[in-house]
Amino acid sequence: MKNIGIKISLYLNYFVFAILLNSVGIVILKSQRNYGVDEVQASILEAFKDMPIAIVSFFIASFLPRIGYRKAMLTGLALVTLACISMYFGNSFDNAKILFATVGVSFALIKVSVYSLIGTVTETKKEHNALMSSIEGFFMVGIALAYFLFPAFNNENDPNSWLNVYWFLAGLSLLSFLFLFFVKFKEPEVATGANLKDDFLQMFKLMAKLLTVIFVISVFLFVMIEQGILSWLPTFNTKVLHLPENISIMMASILAISLAIGRLIAGIVTKKVNWIYVLSVCIISAMLIVVFVLPKTVGLEVKNINTLSDIPLIGFAFPLIGLFIAPIYPLLNSIVLSALPKNLQSSMTGLIVIFSALGGTLGSRITGWLFKNEGPEKAFYFTLIPMSLLLISFFILKKITSKDEI
């Protein structure tokens, strides 16, 4: 199969970072338990993860093709391998900050490379959409695994036992490094005549287009919603449903699994259904879950929970919101990236990564503030505001793209 080696590498790299990036919700919970920080202090971990992603993407995205995608991804994998080992020995909130800062820097290199390479290993818009959705779906599988992986190493009688997971993650990163090092693929050609200054200015030129403005706002709003829920669902399960720590973490995996399923299904559905109908139905369905299902979850009386089977069915309902918000991110990205010339895809990917990082940071910080000041029972209701704005942005984006103004 054509480009099979590099495609496997893209999946594997994204899988590794799915576990690392989205373990932030678990580490937020552990930091409150082990390091004595409150909700607002713990939420800073999201910023340590996302702000380096935004900063590094801003400076390197447009001219990363000159550096080489292989070198960039190898650098990222090497850094997180060392950061995981450092977290094991450091065992402090400060080391958690360093870990996520390193993960953020490395993911910027990985994501820009992966998104740019998708355009080089696919030939049609349908292929691009399918590979984008499947890679993002596999990303969510990694997130789901994290919610089982951490409890597998966690012994509630030993507060430091969970740190052993970082030896496993260091080994997984090293495995991905070795696979990428030996796989053969041809780097995309860099346009001759351009210089680094021109490359750097590409993102600013793209930002001058109305399509780009609406698009990055949409990405920002979506990630604000997704990360706000993903990062704080383990804490919600502990403080509102009063579940034991390990079960709270495993319960959060339902959201990640539903996100994975939703993204994989989206790759099939959008081949036959126009994207605007898919995204509109998805976001409206998500809003209905917040309005009608969340109150019943909050009001749930849970007693003597020892396993997942002890939880009433309604307790599993709210995380299913992932099925409906799942298609939004990969579809928005694919719609714009597949319509751009390949030499502009790296610059646009940089903008995607930057505004995704900013949205994730703001979403987690706002949710952390709401958890502390409004109570965990009310915090998730505020996702209705960015959901409403996102629905409006879909129709503006549709109007612009229908005029071929990319």
Image (cartoon, grey):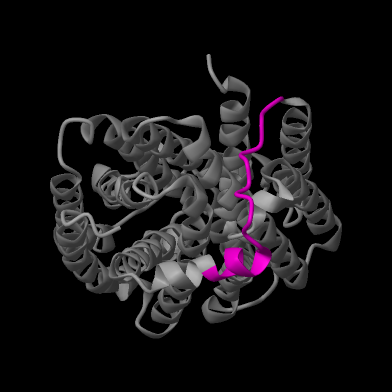
Residue 244 magenta-drawn? no
Q: Viewer-proximal residue, 402 or 352? A: 402
Which x, y percent locates residue 13? Answer: 63, 39
Percent position of residue 374, x then y: 35, 82
In which quadrant of the rendered view does residue 402 lie?
A: bottom left
Q: Is 187 covered by the magenta stretch?
A: yes
Residue 38 in sight from this viewpoint:
yes
Q: Magenta part of the protein: which range?
A: 184-201
Of residues 292 and 276, the one nearer the viewer is 276
Dominant secondary structure (helix, strand or loop) of the stretch shown in magenta: loop
Q: Quadrant of the C terminus?
A: bottom left
- Where is residue 340 drawn, in percent x and y? 39, 50
Q: Is residue 219 left or right of residue 122?
A: left
Direction right: furthest residue? 89
Please indicate whether residue 121 sits to the left or right of residue 328 in the image: right
Residue 178 falls in image quadrant: top right
As drawn, the residue found furthest toward the front would be 193
